[in-house]
Amino acid sequence: MATKSLKKSGSELAQSNKQLEILSNGIFKNGELPTFKAKISETSQFPLIANKLEILQINVGYMCNQVCEHCHVDAGPDRKEIMTRDTMRQCLEVIKTSGAHTLDLTGGAPEMNPDFRWFVEEASKVGIKDFIVRSNLTIIRANKKYYDLPEFFKKHNVHVVSSMPHWTRGKTDKQRGEGVFDMSIKALKELNAVGYGMPDSDLRLDLVYNPSGAFLPGDQAAMEKDFKKALSEDFDIQFHNLFAITNLPIARFLDYLIASENYEDYMYALVEAYNPAAVANVMCTNTLSISWDGYLFDCDFNQMLELPVNSKSKHISEFNEELLEGRKIVISQHCYGCTAGAGSSCQGSVA
Amino acid sequence: MAKNYYDAADLRKFGEITEWNEELGNKFFDYYGKVFEEGALTAREKSLIALAVAHTEQCPYCIDAYTKDTLQRGVTKEEMMEAIHVGAAIKSGATLVHGVQMMNKVNKLDG
């Protein structure tokens, strides 16, 4: 299990241009597989165009208490990129005026940002319809100062979305680290105890499943049924929905694919599972991702690949929703991850 | 012509069998797809059965395909190995139950 980020360990895969080079060369350069651009052109879906903004996803920093094997952010305790209160203020201005109905805070572990609570308090006053915090669960048990997070989330009517790779200890700890399963179960019990995830509760608790290895996620509805049965029977834990998310071949997952000699097979699997119906609903068409330093991206993956939006409005300080609507989405071969099978987004399947 | 009897990459070409007989090939794939849909058995249960049969048939393509398929459906290593033991038990049972035929024959010829 890794203890350092790729960046800290000096891996060349920490560089986004190196990742993009891998994704453009080899099987995509020699014509074995079509590029994403060529594939979506077959069904006249190129260029992908951004529609009306619905979801603002803000990455408040790459610091995390975990070093998960497949993290697309390359997050970890050694990452120091953290959103400042000034940038948060700029984000709040945008949240107030934007037409987006969903605010989605992510990281790293967003709770580790020292201004996280201030930001949640201020953002919750704006009255946005769906206010999501992506919590890795273990942070709730990582330190006494986080123990009250379930109550804090409840107070601000936050919709909690948490990663849970499997309902068994072995598969969870393999991906997310020793002891993560037990801590996650404890955190879920605490969220349930304040009302999160209960069948008739308005306090939304959804789980995110992403595969523990070089394979695609199964059917979301079937997985949800299995998760619910196992977590309820084994631990008396309740949650609302399961989002099945495909691992995208970037950052640490790309590193894992290459090291385990699964890269080509995985790309074949993504391309073979390509679904034009998923392209029509891909999340970048209604989402904007904002980085810790305020730059705008089509999605969190493009943020990590340092592929900025194709628009004159590139930073939160010059946010212009009109300019951003209708922009051409920046694509590369990692985009196949969002269009395989039933599709994948931060809200799960899309087709 | 490859020197190996099996090539993992050939699994991707399975669909090409329709090129030499479209009608039968398509009928087979339609049937195959239908069999694995959710029914009285879940798709997950069917995948585990397929994994066990893949081993008793000793088909390397099927083993690759259904190992991946079961993983995708959240099946654990323990469940996968148990399924294979079910296949192995039937396979060895099928061998041993013929021992009765052998015994009958011995008793008739030399009893």
Image: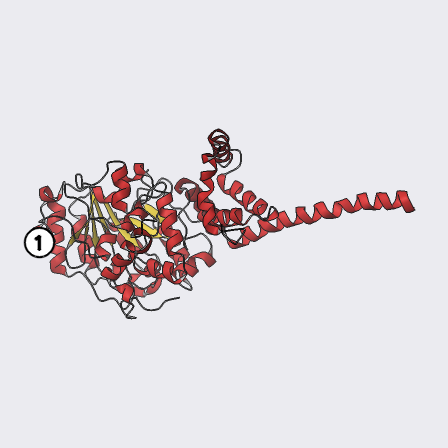
Q: Residue at x 11, y 44 (%)?
A: A321
Q: Assign the N terminus of chain A to one quadrant of the image.
A: bottom left
Where B21 sits versus A116, above or below?
Answer: above
Task: Pinpoint residue A64: horizontal percent, then vertical percent.
Answer: 29, 63
Q: Secondary structure at mark 1?
A: helix
Disc 1 residue type?
A: Ser
Looking at the image, can residue A114 be seen?
Answer: yes
Closest to the observer, A77 or A85:
A77
Q: Which residue is mark 1?
A: A317
Q: Residue at x 14, y 43 (%)?
A: A327
Asked if residue A174 lies left or right of residue A150, the reply is right
Task: Pinpoint residue A56: horizontal percent, then vertical percent.
Answer: 19, 47
The outermost residue toward the top is B23
Asked if residue A37 lies left or right of residue B110, the reply is left
Closest to the observer, A74 or B8:
B8
Closest to the observer, A338 or A227:
A338
